């Protein structure tokens, strides 16, 4: 009988024990996968904003229509500029109040919402060209201020650093949890099959021969638990994604995306590796007694 057949038979006999172990592993991996998903999407937003060639040019309240047209013509004639859109104070107020009425904002007069020019640039060096154009625009007397995504990108960078640190700490906790759960399960399975193991040892079976099916069972527990965690997270992601506001997606510059396939595959592989390693280490001491 091959080690795989022996592992299948042992897992079938102790299926309740293994199901409990898989569930515990899944809970641990869901936490890790969720943290990775958040970090992955924050990184996507940061990359999108860092490479974005978009700026909002807020105009002075005393600006005239002729001055607005002059700035707009100059921007359209600038190399790399793909679009210039004028947003009046009334348009800004209406866009801000779209989707729901905030009593405080709705009570403000139209003059409280500054008019602006929305500028889009394209090209590989759009971000660098945007810095130059922004500096030139900020020097104009009819321009109040120029807002780009650079500051937000830096803030997201700090948030991303903290998220990666938190994910790394969580990964260590998950590693410890998986090793503990799988080790305990394999030890219990060994105790239940103590007679079978003793018979095998009496007929000359080596420790490696006895250990292999348990290592396979540990790897299966880790891999199945990680795979179930990915499936559960995908379901939760689908629920959140179905309620995601398209307006928010336009503001962020991207819509949420799920973990890449390689990340999902790597998580399942990590589960299998942790499960196999935990089983091997726990049995190494027990079989030597």
Image (cartoon, rainbow, N blue to C red):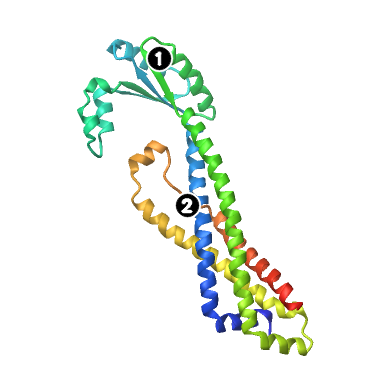
Q: Looking at the picture, does residue 32 appear above or below residue 195?
A: above
Question: Which percent across, then down, holds residue 246?
Answer: 34, 43
Q: Looking at the picture, does residue 23 appear above or below residue 12?
A: above
> Extreme front residue here?
289
Residue under the image location 59 percent in, 49 percent down: 168
Q: Quadrant of the rendered structure where residue 106 is? A: top left
Residue under the image location 65 percent in, 79 percent down: 4
* Label 2, label 1: how far apart the Cα atoms are: 42 Å
- Image quadrant where one finds the N terminus: bottom right
Mark drawn on residue 74: 1
Residue under the image location 59 percent in, 64 percent down: 178
Q: Residues within 10 Å of mark 1 (few under 14, many from 20)?
A: few
Q: Which mark is nearer the camera, 2 or 1?
A: 2
Q: Quadrant of the rendered structure where residue 197 is? A: bottom right
User: Label 2 belongs to which residue?
Assistant: 258
Q: Residues within 10 Å of mark 2 (few under 14, many from 20)?
A: some
Question: Which percent across, then down, holds residue 56?
Answer: 39, 24
- Image quadrant where one finds the C terminus: bottom right
Asked if residue 204 lies left or right of residue 110, the reply is: right
Question: Which percent across, then down, holds residue 270?
Answer: 61, 60
- In the structure shown, which secondary structural element does the residue marked by tag 2 occupy? loop
Asked if residue 81 lies left or right of residue 66, the reply is: right
Q: Looking at the picture, does residue 252 appear above or below residue 12?
A: above
Question: In this view of the protein, which residue sits in the foreground, 220 or 184?
Answer: 184
- In the structure shown, which secondary structural element does the residue marked by tag 1 occupy? helix
């Amino acid at each position: 009988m091959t080690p795989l057949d022996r592992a299948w038979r042992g897992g079938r006999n102790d299926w309740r024990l293994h199901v409990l172990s898989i569930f515990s592993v899944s809970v641990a991996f869901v936490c890790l996968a969720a943290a990775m998903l958040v970090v992955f999407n924050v990184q996507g937003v940061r990359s999108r904003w860092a490479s974005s060639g978009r700026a909002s040019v807020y105009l002075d309240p005393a600006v005239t229509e002729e001055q607005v047209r002059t700035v707009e013509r100059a921007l359209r004639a600038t190399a790399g500029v793909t679009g210039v859109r004028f947003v009046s104070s009334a348009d800004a107020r209406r866009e801000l109040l779209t989707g729901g009425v905030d009593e405080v904002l709705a009570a403000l007069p139209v003059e409280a919402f500054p008019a602006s020019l929305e500028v889009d640039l394209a090209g590989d060096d759009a971000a660098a060209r945007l810095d130059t154009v922004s500096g030139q625009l900020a020097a104009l007397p009819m321009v109040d201020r120029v807002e780009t995504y650079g500051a937000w990108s830096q803030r997201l960078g700090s948030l991303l650093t903290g998220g990666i640190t938190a994910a790394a700490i969580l990964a260590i906790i998950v590693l410890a949890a998986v090793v503990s759960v799988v080790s305990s399960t394999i030890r219990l399975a060994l105790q239940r099959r103590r007679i079978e193991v003793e018979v095998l040892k009496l007929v000359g079976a080596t420790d490696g021969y006895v250990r292999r099916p348990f290592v396979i069972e540990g790897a299966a527990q880790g891999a199945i638990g990680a795979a179930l965690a990915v499936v559960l997270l995908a379901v939760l992601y689908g629920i959140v994604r179905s309620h995601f506001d398209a307006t928010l997606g336009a503001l962020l510059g991207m819509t949420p995306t799920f973990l890449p396939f390689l990340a999902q595959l790597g998580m399942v592989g990590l589960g299998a590796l942790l499960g196999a390693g935990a089983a091997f280490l726990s049995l190494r001491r027990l079989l030597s007694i």
